[in-house]
Image (spheres, helix red, strand yellow):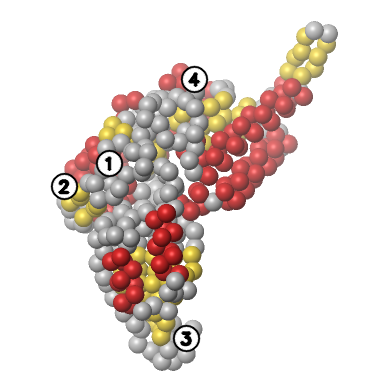
Amino acid sequence: MIAITACAAALAVVTVGLLLRSEYEKKHFVTDQYEIESPKLPDGATFRCVFLSDLHDNVYGTDNEPLVAAIRAFKPDAVLIGGDMMVSKGRGDLDISLNLLRQLTARYPVYYGNGNHENRMNRDVQQKNASDSLKALEGARKLGCRTFLFSGSQAEYGIHREAMTEDTPLNPVSEYGKAKVDFGRQAMEAVSRWRQEGYDCHGDSCTERASDHFRYIHARIFSIYGPGDHPWSLVESCLKTFPAGGYLSLGECTQMWNFLYLDDLLEALTALWLSGAEGIFNVAGERGETRPLRDYVRLMYEACGCHGCYSYGRRPQNAEGPANLIPDVKKLMEATDWRQEIPFQEGIRRLIQSKNI
């Protein structure tokens, strides 16, 4: 979303605002006007500000020239940025965002707040997450816990074009993925060390003390949808836009993808917990749920009564090409009695019903 707003005193006339909507990387923006009254400014004073967020590496025209021109015409006193100007998946390219920021900072004061995509690329933030998780692991052991289940991520694998098993080489692109990998490695090393320290050895034989047995489960969770999903996710964007008769501009959506409903995720994690299994497990939809992303879009469009419209190819691909999501959950299914219960069509039906669409 891109919004240009103006604030004024309680008794002052507030200046026109400009809203540049980018519903899932829309390529055309429209303008709306907003008037906001505020007692924090002197009577008669005005403050014109532009608010930008969720561009997700989108480019309007050449080097965002139409966008910059619209901002310049508004003559703002400052530019506020709410984050998610870039995309942390794929190559995590910062060039588009940095180019726009250079143009803006040359003319206006710019105040930038990170969104979740920036935080995923922020090394300090992600390293702190990993460090705090290690403290939680150590704390769990000291409290006498016997099992620690960690929510890993598909981001640990990086970009692959073939099926991802737990043995697939890890090549994370984002700092988020790197932190997950780093924590998993350190956690397994710690658990192995604790076990070695917890053996009673007599002569040539060693016996593990039951009190020192600590089980570590690393669940690499793939693409989840359901209640509580981010409002900017593909599923939420479709279910918001189509029933309202709106337009959704998408990328090519030719990559293979896999969705898993939230309830099935919880059942899978519970099954891992109860099974006695340990180690690394992919948690995702079964093989039959992996399909081209366009198929998922079509199913949501049909579930919404074919209202609204959408188009493909409006957003450039990553340099590496589309990031496929082809998880292999054979290990999970062999270690537990878990089976996927909610196919995508049923999950979407439940979401539509919960939203009273």
SS of the residue under disc 2: loop
Q: Which residue is drawn at 33% across and 77% down?
A: 74
Front residue of 275/206: it is: 206
Determine which residue is flagged by label 3. 41
Numbered disc in front, either 4 or 1: 1
SS of the residue under disc 3: loop
Q: Which residue is drawn at 39% across and 77% down?
A: 76
Hey, what amino acid is under mark 2? Cys
Residue 79 drawn at (x, y percent): 43, 71
Q: Which of marks 2 and 1 is nearer the N terminus?
A: 1
Q: Do the residues labelled 3 and 4 touch (CB within 8 Å)?
A: no
Mark sitting on residue 335: 4
Numbered disc in front, either 2 or 1: 1
Q: Earlier in the sequence, mark 3 or mark 4?
A: 3
Hey, what amino acid is under mark 3? Leu
Where, quadrant-wise, is the N terminus in this rendering?
bottom left
Q: How far apart are marks 2 and 1 (CA)?
A: 18 Å
Q: Which residue is drawn at 45% across and 36% down?
A: 158
Mark sitting on residue 253: 1
Q: Earlier in the sequence, mark 4 or mark 2?
A: 2
Q: Do the residues labelled 4 and 2 touch (CB within 8 Å)?
A: no
Q: How far apart are marks 4 and 2 (CA)?
A: 41 Å
Mark sitting on residue 306: 2
* Residue 352 drawn above or below residue 254: below
Q: Earlier in the sequence, mark 3 or mark 1?
A: 3
Numbered disc in front, either 3 or 4: 3
Q: Distance between the residues labelled 4 and 1?
A: 33 Å
